[in-house]
Image: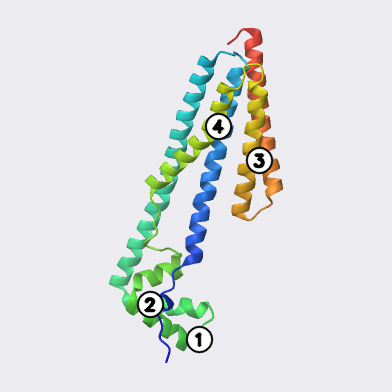
Amino acid sequence: MTTESTTDLHPEPQGADIAAKLNWLRAGVLGANDGIVSVAAVVVGVAGVTTNNGPILAAGMAALAGGAISMALGEYVSVSSQSDSQRHLIAKERDELRDQPEAEFKELVAMYRHKGLSAETATKVAEELTEKDPLRAHLDIELNIDPDEVVSPWHAAIASAVSFLCGAVLPLLSILFFPAAMRVWLTFIVVLVALAITGAVGAWIGGGSRSRASIRVVIGGAIALATTYALGSLLGTTGAA
């Protein structure tokens, strides 16, 4: 005689868990990419005006702090809206189960019938799930929501800020520590290599073409750096800065 373990009866949603982790990783890569481009554009632009480290450091630190706060705030607002919506839907479904249990049961059966189950099997599945956890059963099939996985806006905001800072530090250190005569061009190279890597990693996570993603990100970064450096050089030449 064979016995079923608890794990067999209640398998862990490994696929969903992996997908969630990959989404967080992808968001982190994109945040780092934003940090690289944003701060690199600022420090390269200022380096086009002056070779003094003071103004470059001040501008770079301001861009780093402002960008990290902006990223965190934007992510917090976005995820707060999402989590508020999820909580509202969960509360609404809980009220419907309390006030109309029979109607909700019939709705559950109908949804499993729609998925292709026979009337007998759909009813049996609905009965077993309702006995165990009716709220979770309805949230899963109706709304694809797991009540235990409502996203925290604070976690999202902190992750976004940290990933931005990790990317932003690279161009700031590059422009400050390379020799003045070569700092701009060496920073260009470092930044474009870093962007190629983040582009490839982001594409790998999303299942896309790593080469195409890297090329797109590198071209965009190169345009941003060239534009800000040209503007800085122009302002420095005309004495407007």
Tag 4 secondary structure: helix
Give the mark nearer the N terminus: 1 vs 3: 1
Would you say 126 lies left or right of 216 here?
Answer: left
Residue at mark 3: 196
Marks 4/3: CA–CA distance: 14 Å
Marks 1/3: CA–CA distance: 52 Å
Q: Are marks 3 and 2 in contact (CB under 8 Å)?
A: no
Give the mark nearer the N terminus: 4 vs 1: 1
Please name the residue shown 45% across and 83% down the image. 122
Dot 2 amino acid type: Thr
Q: Quadrant of the C terminus?
A: top right
- Few, some or many residues within 10 Å of mark 4 (<14, 14–19, 20+): some
Tag 1 secondary structure: loop
Q: Which mark is residue 170?
A: 4
Residue at mark 1: 118
Dot 1 amino acid type: Ser
Tag 3 secondary structure: helix
Judge depth for marks 4 and 1 and give the one in front. Answer: 4
Q: 10 and 102: which one is in front? A: 10
Give the mark nearer the N terminus: 2 vs 4: 2
